[in-house]
């Protein structure tokens, strides 16, 4: 009898814990076009629709990957759209995260302030270049560009100073002449162009002809193990958002604009968003080849001591089954 009662109590507690865990899904997102799937999924209610009335989607806005990693480490979020660089670094530090889907390819450009005199990458000598944060995908991409052109960052013994600035604040940093150039995600590159900045390297010239993964959807593995259906619903909403963007560019622009405004109080205009989306491929798939190359560059830059086992870091099984 005691054994039966104990078993019943254990099952009851387990069911109660599961029910408690499943009440919400906390999702991190950036106000960037590279996060278009998330922005549209949130703004159009596509993710909440898939989660249903029993699970509340709690959206948390972040400015960079460092903030996301801190939130994952603190157990403050369950999933997030983020660059592969910060996600890798969190994974390598033992934070329980795994990539469940891609979100975007390319979508970043190198722009120079209109009076900076910069015409190409070699012109960055002696200049200050903004990136979202140290160790971000854009930081690594910039260092890769510098090395290809025989240059180095100042922290590598070179003479190009890399300055971390949140993307939404970069237009103001340009206006205030705090930096000379920026390697940044859209729409902020297009926004700065609209203010007179010069495009130095487009999205195809940054890396691999633009065929590189710039944003992924990462999930806390403990949350995924306890709430597999919630994760499936998140991915269904993610796929629905990607489909929505592919079918209606104008409606997608409005949803992205509205959500960026909600986050930042700043609204890119339609021309800027059109240009930004044209430079970004919104996709759930991942280019594992470039992800492996990125991992090596991340190590060479000193942001990690090793490269991750991609078979453990990336799990596309669920999204592939849903995308069929």
Image (cartoon, rainbow, N blue to C red):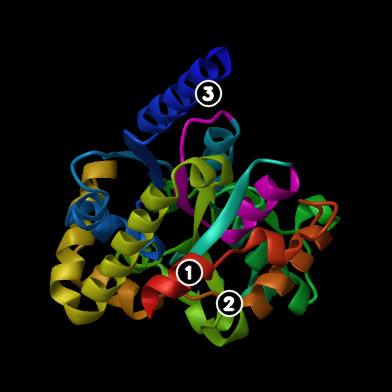
Circle 2 Cα neighbour tier, 10 Å, few/some/many (<14 / 14–19 / ≥20): many
- Residue 150 position within the rendered picture, expressed as x and y whole percent measured from the top left: 80, 75
Residue reaching furthest to the bottom: 209
Report how far apart the C-alphas of labels 3 and 2 lie in the structure: 58 Å
Residue positioned 33% across, 72% down in the render:
276
Does the rendering let one see residue 66? Answer: yes
Q: Nearer the viewer, residue 166 or 231?
A: 231
Residues at badges 2 and 1 in contact (C-beta under 8 Å)? yes
Where, by quadrant of the figure, is residue 272 drawn? bottom left
Residue positioned 48% across, 69% down in the render:
108
Between disc 3 and disc 2, the foreground one is 3
Specify the segment rendered in magenta. 74-93
Magenta span includes 88: yes
Q: Which residue is mark 1?
A: 108
Q: Earlier in the sequence, mark 2 or mark 1?
A: 1
Q: Which residue is mark 2?
A: 206
Q: Earlier in the sequence, mark 3 or mark 2?
A: 3
Mark 3 secondary-structure assignment: helix
Residue positioned 65% across, 48% down in the render:
134
Q: On the picture, is 81 further left or further right than 148?
A: left
């Amino acid at each position: 009898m005691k054994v039966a009662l104990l078993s019943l109590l254990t099952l009851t507690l387990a069911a109660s814990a599961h029910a408690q865990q499943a009440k919400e899904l906390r999702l991190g997102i950036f106000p960037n076009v590279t996060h278009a799937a998330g922005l549209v999924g949130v703004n159009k209610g596509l993710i909440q629709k898939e989660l249903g009335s029993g699970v509340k989607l709690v959206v948390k806005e972040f400015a960079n990957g460092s903030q996301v990693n801190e939130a994952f480490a603190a157990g403050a979020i369950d999933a997030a759209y983020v660059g592969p660089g910060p996600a890798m670094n969190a994974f390598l530090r033992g934070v329980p995260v795994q990539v469940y889907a891609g979100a975007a390819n390319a979508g970043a450009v190198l722009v120079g302030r209109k009076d900076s005199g910069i015409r190409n990458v070699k012109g960055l000598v002696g200049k200050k270049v903004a990136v979202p944060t140290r160790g971000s995908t854009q930081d690594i991409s910039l260092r890769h560009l510098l090395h290809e052109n025989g240059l180095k960052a100042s922290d590598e013994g070179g003479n190009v100073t890399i300055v971390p600035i949140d993307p939404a604040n970069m237009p103001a940093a340009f206006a205030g002449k705090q930096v000379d150039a920026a390697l940044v995600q859209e729409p902020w590159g297009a926004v700065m162009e609209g203010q007179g900045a010069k495009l130095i390297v487009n999205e195809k010239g940054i890396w691999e002809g633009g065929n590189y993964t710039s944003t992924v959807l990462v999930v806390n593995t403990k949350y995924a193990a306890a709430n597999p259906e919630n994760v499936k619903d998140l991915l269904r909403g993610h796929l629905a958002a990607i489909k929505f963007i592919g079918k209606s560019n104008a409606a997608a622009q409005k949803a992205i604009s509205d959500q960026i405004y909600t986050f930042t109080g700043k609204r890119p205009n339609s021309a800027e968003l059109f240009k930004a989306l044209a430079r970004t491929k919104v996709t759930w798939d991942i280019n594992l080849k470039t992800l492996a190359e990125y991992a090596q560059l991340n190590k060479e830059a000193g942001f990690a001591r090793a490269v991750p086992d991609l078979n453990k870091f990336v799990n596309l099984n669920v999204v592939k089954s849903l995308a069929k």
